[in-house]
Image: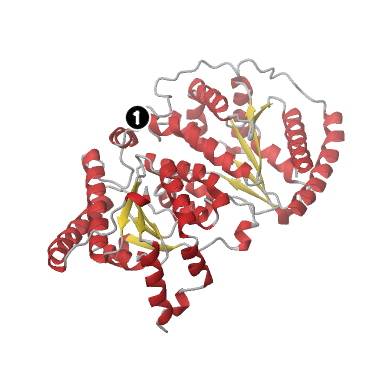
Amino acid sequence: MLEKIDLSRKLDRDEYKKVAPMLRDRLGELQRLARSAGMPVVIIFEGWEASGKGTLINELILSLDPRGFMVHFVHAASDDNQNAYWPPMKRFWEMSPPRGRIGIFNRSWYRLVMDNPAMMPLCVDISSFERQLSQDGYIIIKFFLHISKKEQKKRLKKLDDDKNSTWRVSEKEWQDNKNYDETVKLVNGIVQYTDKSYAPWTLIEAHDKRYAAVKILSTVVKRVEKCLDAYGLKKLSVMAPDSAEFAESEGLEGEDGLANFTLEPSILKNLDLNKALERPVYEEKLPALQGKLRELQYELYKVRRPMLILFEGQDAAGKGGCIKRLTQKLDPRGYQVSPTSAPNDWERAHHYLWRFWEVFPKAGHICIYDRTWYGRVLVERVEGFARESEWRRAYGEINEMEDQLTRYGTIIVKFWLQIDPDEQLIRFNDRKDNSDKNWKITDEDWRNREKWPQYEEAAEEMMLRTSTTFAPWTIVEANDKLYARIKVLKKTADALEKALRQA
């Protein structure tokens, strides 16, 4: 691919002075329109060392409102990050711009693969990351700045000979020039694998800076115009443009094959909710399991593996009671409980998974979630907070995220606590009549109860679509609180033991 580019292309000064200002003016207008429409934009600059990334980024931002963009200079991951069992994409999730803003990357996630060819399988995660952003309304524009081996060597020498820039040229840069032909093969593979309709690459002939600048400006202008036209500027708000419209415009419609999927509930209806445990048995088992979990927690810390324990279920199913018994004997320095509530305005300005990437535990630590990212396919689905196209694609997005986490060492345990409507009513009334508990019951809980069939259907499909080999769901029969607590503790201990044996 790279070998077919004509690097002799140039633009004379007069033509540049005529065209560039018009493109910059239009880009400034488009920035304001994109901000009004709540459209986030990601612009990536990759390329050879000394290909002019910094200069061309400056050309791009000349006409932009500095309050509406941020330039990220991406460096190699630190040893701390590499050893923390965090998936490499975590830091890039954190850098993704909120709606209406532009994120410009001088080097990006692709540098992970370019600096280490053994990381080529990471292209799977990169494509997943870009697809999830694009389906959420992000515009992704990717540039690779191409120069010849001879031109790179000439530029490196010029930088090296100048006392003000010699610091920019190390042995690595010279070695990269020496290995130029091998890197061409690697870049061709990266570009071919990740050149998607929702995040296409634009190869820039970068020998002539004026030509490269105009091509970059015109590419950004055309792409943003196309996306704004696809939305028809119908969504002039902080919310994302309709994802279905975007998918159709980008040739993605029907990609997940779920458009007409329906499912009759069956998993939850076949549970035996009469399972129970006598209190003497419970009081015998509880301290033994809690002690075992504390020992396993120390083993987990020694091998530097993070762990996620997820709790979902109907209101009043007993999540809080299970979490309390689970953490009662754990070392408080090694875990945190993260209750998930409705997203705030800043969180809504990002992809819905962004806020969870921010709080994943570091190596050797445990994070326990009282409700999770599965709210996307539960409450947001039932209450209409997410469009159907959004919650339907969330199954794949969540699976991909959990796959990334487990492949980088994270242990994931997921519990769904199931009670029947009669038991829920008993617990609701108990909360209402007990002054120590009535803070737990709200009008929203009663409204949700009226939608029991819809929530059950959503939970059925959620478990069918997201119970994977690497992160399976455990359904807990929770009509009896004592039985539910012991099952949760035992399953957690079993999962920890199994993972530690494989460490």
Q: Horizontal placement of 202 versus 182: left or right?
A: left
Instruction: Give the percent coordinates (x, y) of residue 200.
Output: 35, 45
Q: Residue at x 26, y 43 (%)?
A: 227
Q: Residue at x 13, y 63 (%)?
A: 15
Q: Nearer the viewer, residue 149 or 200?
A: 149
* Residue 156, picture quadrant: bottom left
Q: Is residue 5 visible?
A: yes
Tell me which amino acid carries mark 1.
Glu
Secondary structure under tag 1 reads loop
Residue under pointer 1: 253
Q: Horizontal placement of 412 versus 108: left or right?
A: right
Q: Residue at x 58, y 63 (%)?
A: 78
Disc tally is: 1
Q: How is the image coloured?
A: secondary structure
| Residue that lies at the very extreme toward the bottom in this rendered image | 163
Q: Nearer the viewer, residue 295 or 56?
A: 56
Q: Residue at x 30, y 67 (%)?
A: 58
Q: Nearer the viewer, residue 176 or 322?
A: 176
Instruction: Give the percent coordinates (x, y) of residue 122.
Output: 53, 46
Q: Horizontal placement of 137 versus 402: left or right?
A: left
Q: Horizontal placement of 24 versus 404: left or right?
A: left
Instruction: Give the percent coordinates (x, y) of residue 6.
Output: 28, 54
Quarter holding the C terminus?
top right
In the image, residue 430 sits, relative to residue 237, either above or below, namely above
Crowd around label 1: few <14 · some 14–19 · many ≥20 (10 Å)? some
Q: Is residue 358 visible?
A: no
* Residue 282, picture quadrant: top right
Q: Nearer the viewer, residue 503 or 389?
A: 503
Instruction: Give the percent coordinates (x, y) of residue 208.
Output: 26, 64
